[in-house]
Image (spheres, rainbow, N blue to C red):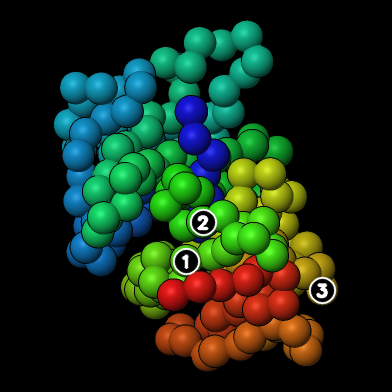
Amino acid sequence: MPTYLSLSFQYSKKKISAHTVRAFCDTLLRCGVAFVGGYWTSEGDSYDEIVSWNQQKLEQNFELGDAEHVSHGYKQMLLQYMEFSEVRLFIHNERKQAYFSFELIFPENDLLIPDPVHEWALRMNQLVKIENLAVQLWENETMDCIQAGWELAETPVSYTDIAAGDIPLIEPFCVVPKSVVRRRWHVQYREVGRDGVYIRDVERFHTVE
């Protein structure tokens, strides 16, 4: 199984409505992502079946227990976006936390190439496609933040902690509200819609076209 770059779209549970899952998934499709089918335990399920199942689980604040079979949990979608070899969407929720997230993942092999000096280099032409998608989703949805992270990176930071001053996960980018930004010299900033700021770490990640 390949390793993945994850985009974590965090939402306050106070924002959950009867249409939360459908609204996010429909916006994703309007941004150029295509639904291919269910994944793993949801193979053969339709788009509407997966949306309805996940909405019900989210409204129940469901968290899969250690002893529960994975088929009882949130269902995954297999998607297609541009020429990426695989894209998947699933929901991450911890019952005691104030936020849940939609997780959109891309194979790291689609983004990284070996580099003789830095070991790995980030393919900018591929990253830009993911960045543009993230910004579109930010501007057309109501998530509180977006954090990107490689599989071996730290876990995304809770938006509660970001609002209190903690640095979000920026591997290699994030989108956060302008009100929580703390300027750091080696990070690139760009204002986006919905009073957001797109941030990319330009010091730690060597890029090639």
Among the 4 quarters of the image, the one containing residue 97 = top right
* Nearer the camera: disc 3 or disc 2: 2
Q: Is residue 39 found left or right of 182 in the rendered image?
A: left
Label 2, residues with CA under 10 Å away: few <14, some 14-19, many ≥20: some
Q: Is residue 181 above or below residue 84?
A: below
Instruction: Check contact, mark 1 vs mark 2: CB within 8 A.
Output: yes
Q: Which mark is residue 123?
A: 1
Q: Which residue is mark 2?
A: 113
Say which residue appears at 35% left-offset and 18% top-offset: 41
- Nearest the viewer among 145 and 99 is 145
Q: Quadrant of residue 193?
A: bottom left
Q: Identify the disc placed on residue 194.
A: none
Label 3 crowding class (10 Å Cα cut-off): few <14, some 14-19, many 20+?
few
Which of pointers 1 and 2 lies earlier in the amino acid sequence? 2
Q: Quadrant of the C terminus?
A: bottom left
Inter-mark Cα distance, 1 to 3: 31 Å
Residue 165 location (% of width, % of height): 82, 73
Residue on which the image places disc 3: 165
Element type at mark 3: loop
